[in-house]
Image (spheres, rainbow, N blue to C red):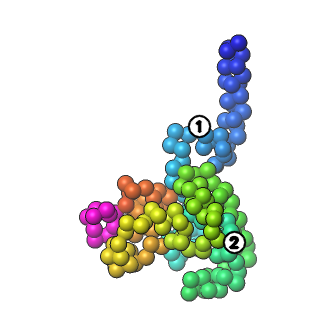
Amino acid sequence: MKKPLFTLVLAGLPLLAGSAMAEESFSQWLFTLDRMKEFRPVDNETYAEECGACHFAYPPGLLLAMSWQKLLDPVALEDHFGENAELGEDTLAEIQAYVIENSAENSYYKRARKITRSVQSIEPPLRITQVPYIKRKHHELTAAMVRDNPEVGSLSNCNACHTQAEQAVFDDDSVQVPNFQHWDE
């Protein structure tokens, strides 16, 4: 009796593996050893160039789709946190599609899922620094480490302290707060 079940499961594995051809399929997430703990790195050249020209190109999994839709509304881009960030129609459409497809609730990455859960009971924030999960992860940081630190200035400046932010890695082991020997001192 046990042998047919084992054979059936074994025969079904290639079918599941076939669905793993997508970048972030459920079966890939299920069978990977590292469980994709961080975020999907930015892999859209247009997004990286256009958004990264003014600030760190945040991994889309840091916000929900509704937040990205509001941020990338053509009218909102006329005053994007005090700057005019208007984009051409085709460029905007490409960036919108990319960030929504890879937003927190559309990701299998562990931290993106935590962001989704943390925002469920509130209006989706427009600022990454307003995401409850992000706020909770940074609650120990002092003003001297962030706001009053000339090399950081704001929690929105992720790559100032997260040395692997470009690879979408934000774990504690890769944190180095400028002008502080240890981030947790």
User: Image check: 54 left or right of 68?
Assistant: left
Image location (x, y in percent) of residue 181? 26, 64
State the extent of the magenta-drawn residues as a range.
Answer: 176-185
Nearer-the-camera pick, 95 or 140: 140
Residue occupying the point 67% across, 30% down:
13
Residue 98 counted in the magenta span? no
Q: Quadrant of residue 101?
A: bottom right
Query: Can residue 118 be seen in this snapshot?
Result: yes
Numbered badge on residue 69: 2
Which quadrant: the C terminus?
Answer: bottom left
User: Image check: 177 left or right of 104?
Assistant: left
Numbered badge on residue 31: 1
Which quadrant: the N terminus?
Answer: top right
**Secondary structure type for disc 1:** helix
Q: Quadrant of residue 148?
A: bottom left
Numbered badge on residue 11: none
Image location (x, y in percent) of residue 169? 47, 56
Image location (x, y in percent) of residue 94? 70, 68
**Secondary structure type for disc 2:** helix
Query: Can residue 60 be seen in this snapshot?
Result: no
Residue occupying the point 70% across, 78% down:
73
**Eyeballing the image, is 37 above or below 20?**
below
| First-in-chain label (1 vs 2) | 1
* Main SS category, magenta section: loop
Dot 1, crowdedness within 10 Å: few (<14), some or many (≥20)?
few
